[in-house]
Image (cartoon, coloured by chain):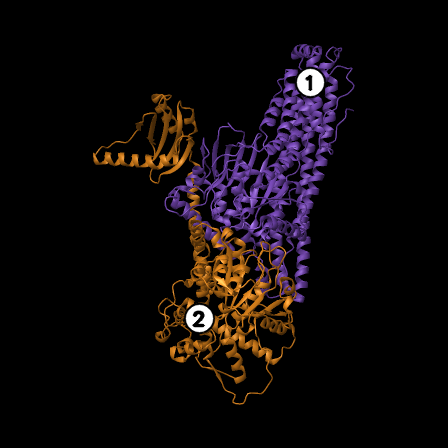
Amino acid sequence: MSFDHDTSLDANSAPDSETGVSKLVTTHAYARLARFALRRPRVAVMGEFSAGKSSLVNALVGRAIWPTKVTATHLPPCWLRHDPSAGSELVGDAVAADGSRRRLARDALTAEGMAEGRAIAVSLDAPHLAGFDLVDTPGISDPLLSDDLIEGVAGQVEMVIWCTAVQQAWRQSERARWRSLPRRLRPRSVLVLTHADRLAPEDLARVRRRLEREAGDLFGAMVEVASPRAQAALDGGVVVDADAWAASGLARLLEVVNAQAAAVTAHRAALLTRYLAVEPEPEPEPEPAVARGPFDALAAWNRIREAQGPGDSDEELRRSLLQLAADYDAWAAGARVSPTGAATAGVADTNETVPAWRRRVGPTDGALAMATEHEARIPASGVTSILRMLGIVPPRTETAPASEGVDDGGGDRRDDDGGDRQDDQNDQKESEIMKDQMTDISDLKNLNGFLGACLVDSDTGLMLGSEGGASIDLEVAAAGNTEVVKSKSSVMRQLGLDDSIEDILITLGTQFHLIRPLERNPSVFMYVALDKKQANLGMARLQVKKVEQQIRL
Amino acid sequence: MTPLAPDAAHAAGMARIDAMRDRLAQALATCVAATGSTSQRLTALERATAEYAPTVTLIGQVKAGKTALANALSGRPGLLPVQVNPYTAVVTRLLLSPPGTSERSEFDFFGDADWRALTEGGGALGAIARRAELEDEARELADQIAMMRETAKAKLGQHFETLVGRNHAFDTVTTALLERYVAAGDEEPGREHVGRYAEITRAARLIVASPVVRTPLVLCDTPGVNDPFLVREQVTLSGLSHSDICVLVLSAHQALTTVDVALFRLCATLDVGRIVIFVNRMDELEDAAGQRVEIERRLREALTRHALPSNVTILFGSALAAQSGEPGADRASGVAALREHLDASLADSTVREHFRALALEALNIARIELLVASKAEAEHRRTRPGRSETIVALDRIVAETERQLQEVLKALHETLVRRVLVIGREIADRECQVVAEEAATRRVQGWAVDTIGLRRQLKENYDATMAEGITSVGAVLEASARRIERLYMALLPPDIDGIALDLPALPTPRPPVAIARTLSVELDASWWRRLLMRERGIEELQRRLRGVLDSEITALGEEVIQRHFKPFVACIGDVVRDFLSAEAERLIALADEDAEAERRAAMAALGADPERLDALAEAVATLEAIGAEGAGQQRKATAA
C-alpha cells in the first residue's frame, strides 16, 4: 500500500551502498539517470493564501504574470521554467490528471483560462530562474480550496520557499502544515518573510527574533522580502536599480536558493558517478515517456499505481528514480548524523557513520567538473556549499542536531518519562506545602492613610501578595526594598550583632514606609506605604504585626 | 493619546439599554415606595437591575487586532498593551463603567488544580493528544510546558509556584501594570518586566472608567488562536459560553482562513444574532473600498460552502485608525458602527431577556400587594390558616416540588447520557463503513472524520434534550404555583375572585460550546493518512478508529455534562427555589396574626391613598409589559 512517495523511499534503502561497488545499468537507463541527475533542481513556493506568494513569483520572474489579490488566487500548481527562446511570450501547457498536455492559447494564459488543468507548465524568459525551476502552489488554509495538492508537489521538489506575511507571521496552521511535509526539505528550504516593507524596522526585528526562536530549526535560512521594492528595481525583467534590488531582499533570496540548487546538482552528479553504463548495444527503442516535470512524474506515478501490471519500462523508471532518491536521502541522513568535522570524505575511512560509497566520492571523481558543466551557472558562493554537501568541508552546525535523525528511538523517551515522574513527585510535595499557605494581607487596607502594601520574598524580589497601590508601583517597591533588607542584614552581620530586624521605618516628606520581616520566616517581609498626614504610626505597627500573625508560609 | 468623546449615534444606541434599565428600576422603586415593603427579594432585584452588565467577547486568530479593537471600543486608546508579535497571553475582562467609576485591576493566578492539570498533563489539549496517541503533539506540548515553567522560574525565582491559587489586586489600571500580567514577554533590554507574571496568570479582571459608555458593559479580550505556542490557545475558549455576543475579528490581509471557519463554527453554537464578524486592519489595504466588496463576497461564499449561516452581520474597519485621536476617527474607522451594532443587538436579545426575568419575579410580589391594598376595606375572612399551619402547608409544597424536580432532572441526565452513547455508536459505525469503502477505492487522500456531522448531531440532541427538560420543569413549577395560589386564596379576603401567579422565567440553556472544542481527529490532518499507511488491515484500522472515536465522544459527552448540563441544572434549581422562597416569605407574612393588624393598617392606608395605589398599579402594568416583551413561550398559571 505505498501511495506515498516518502514512505516508499524509507522502505527502499540502497542495497549496494555498503559494498561500494558501482552499479551496472544499461546505457539507455544511464542516459535517463543522467538526465535526471542533471535536470534543474525544483523549488516550490508555498504558504497560506494572501501571504504574498504571487507578488514574490512576479518579482522572481521579473514581470507581473499573476494577479495579486487580498483574497485567494485560485490557480492550480504552476511549473515555471526558464527558456531564453521564449522571448517575451508565455508558453503554457495545461497538464491533465492523466499526464496529457494541451497547449494553451495565448489569450487563455490568464487566471481564468489556466484554472482548467490539474497543473500548468509555463516556459518563459526569466533569467533569474536559470539555476532552478519554480513551482508555484495554491495557498493553504483557504476554506474554499483543498490543500491536498501541495503534498504531491512537495514530493517532487528539492526545496521550498515558504512565504509568511510579517503582519501575521508563522501561525500554528502554517507550522502544522510545514511539519507534515517531508522532513528532508527542511535544511534546504527558505522561510521568506513577505511584506517586510509594511513594518517599522524595530517591529520587523521583533518578528524576526520570534521566528528564529519558533521556526529556526525548521528551515535552512530565513530571508525578509519586500516585493514592491523588487518590482521598482526591475525594468522589463532586468535589474536596473541594484541598491533597491538588494534592499528588497530578492538578491539575498536568489543567492540562498541558487547556492542550495547548485549543491543539489553537485550532489546528484556525484551520485551519478556510481553508475556504469555496460550494454554496448543499446536497444533503439523509442524515446520513453520520460518525466519532464513534476507533474509528468506524478502522472507516471499514478499510472503505475492504477495499472494492475505495470509496464516494465515504467517499473524500471520507477526503480531508478527511487534508487536515486533513496541514495540521496541516505547520503543526507549520513551527513546529518555524522559528528561535525569528522565527516570529511577523504579521511573518513574509519568513520562508521559515513556510508562506504561516500568515501569513494572525492574531488577527483569529477563530480565537481560535471556539476560545473551543468547548465546551471553556479555562483561563487555556491562552491563552498557544494564542498560542504560533499563532506569535503565540515557541515555547518546549523544542520539539524543529531537527535533529529534518531527521533523515533524508544530508549530516549523512556528516560524522559522517568524524569517526569521524578518531577511529578516534587510537584506533589510542593503543592502539599502550598496548601498550608496563607498570604492574604487585605486587612491592611483598613489602616488610616493606607497607600499600598505587599508581601515580598527577599531572596528573589518576588511579590507574594499585594493590596492597593494606586499611587505606588508596588512591583518596583518590592524589588527595591529587597535591597534595603539585605543590606541592613549584612550591616548587622558585619557589626557582629546577633539580633533580628523587627521592622524598618522610613519616613519621607509625605509618606511612611514600613518594612517588617516575618518573625517565622525572615527572608519574607511585609512592606506597607502610608500617607503621613492621615496615618497613625503606632496603630499601623500594631496592625501590621497582627496581619503578620495570619500569614503562613 | 487622548480619550475619545462619546459619539452621538452611539450614545443613542446605548440609550436604549439605559432606557430599559431605567424603566425597570423605576417600576421596582415605585413598588418598594408604594408598599413600604421590606421584601429582601425586591431589594435584591433592584440591585441586580442596577449592576447587570452584558458581555461582549472578542475572538480571532493571532494578530487579527483583537486587543487594539478592545482599546478602540473601550474609548481608552493604548490601554491594553499591543505588539507586532502575539502579545495577549491572558483572558482580560474589562468592566467598562461610566466615567468617574473608581478603577481596579485584579489578576488571578492559576488555581492549584488547573496549574497541575496544565503542567503535568498539558491541559485539555494534552489529554486529547494522549487519547489519540499523537505522540509528537503530546511531546511538543510537554516541551512547551517545560519551557513555560523554566521561563516563569527565570522571571519569578525558585518559589514562583507559591503564587498558584492567589491573586494580585491594585486600585489602578495602567498599561505598565497590564504589561506585567497579560502581555507575553519581550526580550528587549530594559523591558524585562513585561510578562513577568504572564505564564501563571489565568485571568485579568479590570474595572475601567470609559468615556464612551453610559451603562456597564463587559468587554472580554482573548489571546489569539492558531498560535504556535499551543498552550496559550487553551485559555481562550473556556470563557466563550458566558458571552452574550461574540465578535469574530478577522484581519483584512487574509480574510477567513480555515482556522476562522473553525472558530466561526464554534461561535455558531451561539445564535447567529449573537455573532458579528469584524474585518479589522482595513487601513492597511491599498484599495480598501474596492477590496471590501471582494472580501465580503468571498466571506459569504465560504460560509455558504461550509453550511454556516451566511447572513451574519459583517462589518469593516480599523481599530488602529479609531485610536488616532482625530475628530470623527471613531466613525470613519468603522468602530462606531460596530459599537452601535453591539448595543442594538444586546438591547434586542440578552438585555431584554434578563430584564424580563427580573420583572416577572417582581411582578408576583407587586401584584398581590396591589390586590390586597385595593381590597383592604373588605371583610376579614373568619377562619384562615395561622402562621404555623401555613408553614406546614408550605413545607409540603416545597418538599413535593423538590422531589418532582429531582426526578425530572435525573431522567433528563439519563436521557442525555443515553443519547450521547447512541450517537457515538452511530458515528463510529458510519465512519468505519466509510473507511472500508474509501480503502477499497484507495481514495483516502481527501478523507477525514466527519466532525461537522458529529457536532451537529450532538448539538441538536443537546438542544432537544434541554427543551424537553424545560417543558418538564415548567410542568413541575406550574403544579406548585397552583398549590401556592390555593394557599393565597385561603389567606386573602373572601371577595377576591382569584389570583394568577406568573411562573419565573426559566434560564435559556447556554450553548454547549464544549462540543466545538478541538477533537483529536482534527488535530493533524495528515494523521489519518499516516495511520492508513501504517496499519496492517482494514479490521485493525477500524478497531483503532472505533477506539479513538469512542473515547473521544465519551470524553466530549462528559465535558458537555460537566461544563453545561450540571451548571444549567443548578441554575434551574436556583430559579425554582428562589420562586418558592419569595412566595413563602410573602405567605408567612400574610399569615402572621401578630403582624396582621399592623399590615392591615398599612394596606388600608395605601388603599385609601389613591395616588400611591395608582402608582403601584402603574408599576405593575410596567412590569407586566416588560414581562410580556418577547416572551411568547412562557405560560401563565391560572388559579383553580
Residue picked out by circle 1: B616
Q: Secondary structure at mark 2?
A: helix
Question: How far is mark 1 from mark 2, CA to CA?
Answer: 91 Å
Residue B76 or residue A536, whichever sits in front: B76
Chain A display color: orange
Residue A169 is left or right of residue B294, and the answer is left
Residue A108 is left or right of residue A28, and the answer is right
Circle 2 Cα neighbour tier, 10 Å, few/some/many (<14 / 14–19 / ≥20): many
Seen in the picture, residue A201 relative to B175 is either above or below; the reply is below
Find residue A263 and name its label.
Answer: 2
Q: Position of residue A121 (x, y in %)?
A: 59, 69
Quarter of the image where one finds residue A472: top left
Residue B596 or residue B243, whichever sits in front: B243
Circle 1 Cα neighbour tier, 10 Å, few/some/many (<14 / 14–19 / ≥20): many
Amino acid type, label 1: Leu
Chain B display color: purple
Residue B192 is left or right of residue B165, and the answer is left
